[in-house]
Amino acid sequence: MKVRTPIQVRYQETDQMGVVYHANYLVWFEIGRTAFIEELGFRYFDMEEKGIVSPVVDAHMYFKQPIRYGQPANVETWLEAYDGLRTTYGYNVVDEEGNIAVTGSTKHVIVKKDNFRPVSLRKTFPEWHLAYQKAMGDK
């Protein structure tokens, strides 16, 4: 399962060369990740209301070509890995012709907001667990 999210490149996201500043891709990854989760029928907000948050514990980005101000872009998001405790999302930022500009991944765990102790997605949110397994192609 892959979700494609359109991104409007805003002027303030670019540097003096008119190229998207590298840190903004992490924001775009989050936009794509949120859209992916919503496509599964869930919301981060619902998780957070139960005192659970999902911090990034690892992030990678690889730059292949620039995205510039005014250029249409999309973030493609999918589950790269999931084991019930850790979730790794994969991303491509693509231009309007479908050329890959940036690839990346972020790894997450879910933790209790008050003490940052890890919890099992499988046990705490079994419906998310089943949806993630299905999105990964597991039965």
Image (tube, rainbow, N blue to C red):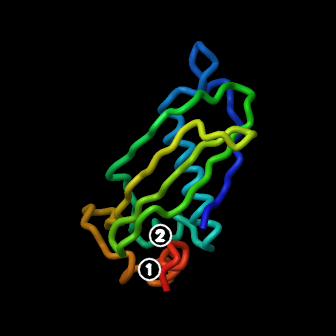
Rendered residue at 34%/63% (across/down): 109
The answer to which quarter of the image holds residue 17 is top right
> Is residue 49 left or right of 121 when viewed as pictured?
right
Observer-nearest of 107 and 41: 107
Observer-nearest of 58 and 2: 2
Q: Position of residue 24 (x, y in %)?
A: 53, 34
Precedes in sequence: disc 1 or disc 2: 2
Q: Which residue is mark 2?
A: 47
Which quadrant is home to the N terminus?
Answer: bottom right
Mark 2 Cα within 10 Å, few/some/many (few <14, many 20+)? some
User: SS class of the residue under badge 1?
Assistant: loop
Q: Position of residue 101 (x, y in %)?
A: 59, 36
Disc on res. 125:
1
User: SS class of the residue under badge 2?
Assistant: helix
The residue mark sitting in front, 1 or 2, is 1
Observer-nearest of 1 and 113: 1
- Disc 1/disc 2 C-alpha distance (Å): 8 Å
Residue type at mark 2 is Met
- Residue 110 lies, with reference to residue 14, above or below; the image says below
